[in-house]
Every structure is written in structure tokens, then in C-alpha cells.
Amino acid sequence: MSLAVTLTAAAVLAATVPAVPAAARPAADGNGGHRCPQLSAGLPWYGANRERLQSVIDTYGTCSGPRSGPGRGDRPVAVFDWDNTVTKNDITDLAVAWALKHDKILRPESWSDTSPWLTEEAVRTLTEACGTEVPAGEPLPTSTDTDCTDEIFSIRSEAALTNGHDAFAGDWNSRRTLPQYAWVPQLFAGHTEAEVTAYARKSRAEALAAPVGATQRVGSHTLHAYARYYPQIVDLIRTLRKAGFEVWVDSAGATPVTVAWTGGVGVDREHTIAIRNVLDRRGRITYVQKGCGGEPDSAGGAVMPYIEGKRCRLNEEAFGVTGPDAWRKQPPEKRPVIGAGDSDTDVTIVGDATGAHLVVNRNKPELMCRAYDNADGAWVVNPMFIDPLPRKDDGYPCSTTGYTRPDGTLGPVLREDGSVIPDQADLVHGR
């Protein structure tokens, strides 16, 4: 697809966004400006995305005067995924890598305690690779034990052992949890949350200091060594907060890791949603994770902030919706105005937004199918702000395999009316 065709298609996508009614726009101040704070004109966005987001801020922000509509009470809500939405690169991987390099993983009594879905082969392999010489509850020497480090990191990153065999098996709801994501907080069992946050802050300092593009070795694996806050997203969050929005982070990472980063954009722990483990009487992390929407706490994490699980936790914590209703799409007044994400894990909270669905394009099928279908005219697609991906030449298989069902099988992506979204070309990309 030529650049001209790409830009034309993107213009068509933008043109489908309904204009903000004149009565809803904020009145000009005495100097001809706007009452609402403005996004920085010095930070580049794709196409007219900055202007489109600004119109939502101007319309829904408390800065525009008395209002009614979506939000928490009189405060409109915005929600952001974290990894690769607010920051470039995955902060959980960075924290796990730092912990492995500094011998901060404590040996479990049995690796089977860490997840109900670990296969017998995975338990046996981890036991053999990491050994039993270290007493349970004491640090494993992962900084020097490459075999142990390799198996742990392979399970985290690939859901597989280094021999290629699946590390997890059994039944789980694939729109509420993902075993290898839920497994990460289990690796920190036995520590306090404060200890894990301290480790994450050290990994954060190293990642922000590393040059863009830097990599590191974790055992035999190669992993990114750097991370950056996206300046445009930092500016967006700060502008939203100044405009009276209540800003939330909704991440599939571990709470004590995520909070080490969210303060950098002014989001406190109370507004940070992530996997939360139950603490023991000494305040130490256990293998049991918090439930949601009437689902109980569970060993291994049967529900977590993952696809529909992100909606459940946001509904509970931001809007006070409890019980099974927390799993359901709420009326507009109990939904975010802006939802931002980069992955299929974010598709529900992004799709629930009433004013703008902001998508950072990382070529994730369900999210991009819904974004390019643009059913309500409110989808805003932007390439990654650092090292954006090139055009996905084969597009997205929306009509066949773009959707992950609860049982893990793939099927077509459906609109709310049940119709099938046709396959979509990749229109908004870096090069």
C-alpha cells in the first residue's frame, strides 16, 4: 500500500468521528483561548489525533463547566493500560530480569504451589533446573545458575519450557486470565510488597538510564534493557488530570511492580489496578490472588486484570459496581470517557470508553480489528511513539481468527449487533 493510499485511508477513518456539538464545547476565555488545559502542540501525534483528543477533553472535562454524563460523580474517568501504552517496553519483564540477576526469587516448597496450571513436566523441570539444595523460602542463585534462570524466563515469556513443551495445561477462562502473566507475581511470594516495589524501582532507574535500543542478557535470553515514558501519553495524562479527569491505570502486571512506575505520571496506588496477591499475617506475598466480580480469591489467579478482567476491576474500583454486574458493560455514566491500550488484553476497557478509544498500534488482532472497523466513530489509532512498527502487510484476520474465545480457541470478531467485522488492512503505522 502506498503512502498516499495509507494517508487517504487514515483520513477517511478520522472523518467518521462525529463533530463535537457546538453547545458542548467550552466557551472561550477573555483572551480567545479555552478554559480547558491544552495538549502540548510541541509533541507530535499522528494525523489529527491530538485535536481529536483535545475535543474530548474540552467536551467532558470539568474545566468546561457544569456537566452530566460519563464519569465518577462529577469527575470523568480515563483509564490507561501501562506496558507499551504509557511506557515503551514491558516493565514486568524488566523487574523479573532484575530480580533474576540479583538472586531475589525465593525457592518455593514445590513449584506446583506457584500455579495450578503448571504441567507435571514443568514442575519437574523447574525442580531439576533450580535444585533443592537451597532451603524453601531462601533466595535461588539465579545470577549464576543459568539453567534455572532460563527455565523461569522461558515460562514467563513463552509459556513454554526451554525444550519447547507447553508449561501450562488445563482449563481457564482466556478472557479473564493468562497463566504465564498470573505466574509472575507468584515468583515474588515470600517478599513484602515494599521489597518488590524497591526492586522494581531499581530496574526502572536502570531502564530509564539505558540508551534507547539497549538489550540485556537474562540467562541465555536477550531482552530489552531500556524503557521510556511516552512523552505524548505523559502529557495527555497530565492534561486530563488538570482538566478534572480521574485517571486510572489498569494493568495485567503485578501491583508492587506497577506502582513503582505509575507515580511518574501522577497516578497513585489507589488509582493503580494490577494483579494483587493476598498477604499473610506478616505482610508477605502469598500464592493466592484477589478475585473480582463475585469470583473468589484463588491460587494462581483464575481472574486477573486481563481482557474482561480489566473491565471487572475498573467497574469495582472506579465505579463501585460489585458482584457479577462488574463483568458486564455498564451504562455510559459508569464507563470511562477515554480508554487507552495497545494489546488485545486492553480491548474491553478501551472499547468501553464513551468519548475516545485510543489505540497504540502494536499489531494485536482483536484490538486493531475493532479500531479499524471504527463502529462508533470514536477510535483514535496512533503508531508507537518510539520505534513504531511498519505496516502489517497481511492485515488482520477479523472475519476468521481475530477473536480469542473464553476456551482459548479463535473465531471471528463480532460487533455488538452480532455482525462479523470484515478483515482489515493496517492503515496507521510507522513506515
Image: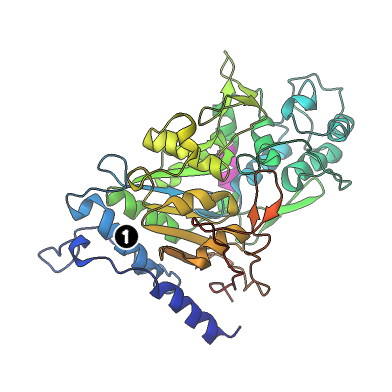
Note whether residue 92 is visible: yes
Q: On screen, 348 above or below 378?
A: above
Q: Main secondary structure of the magenta part?
A: helix
Q: Quadrant of residue 14?
A: bottom left
- Towards the viewer: 56 or 185: 56
Q: Is residue 276 above or below residue 382?
A: above
For the N terminus, the image quarter is bottom right
Place of residue 221 in the rendered image (x, y in percent of width and height, measured from the top left): 78, 50
**Rendered location of residue 183, percent (x, y):** 69, 35
Between 88 and 298, the residue placed more toward the observer is 298
Answer few, some or many: residues within 10 Å of disc 1's Cα (few below 14, many 20 plus, some between 14 and 19): many
Which quadrant holds residue 268? top left
Work out whether residue 175 or residue 77 is closer to the camera in this orientation and state it. 175
Q: Amino acid at mark 1?
A: Val
Q: Is residue 224 left or right of residue 145?
A: left
Q: In terms of secondary structure, where does tag 1 sit?
A: helix
Query: What segment is highlighted magenta in the picture?
Result: 200-206
Please state the horizontal and vertical placement of residue 151, each as a whole percent of the image: 82, 40
**Residue 362 coordinates in the image, percent (x, y):** 60, 62
Figure check: 403 above or below 323: below
Judge from the rendering whether residue 20 lies leftward or rightward of residue 274; answer left or right: left
155 on left or right of 343: right
Disc 1: which residue:
56
Residue 114 as seen in the image, left or right of residue 353: right
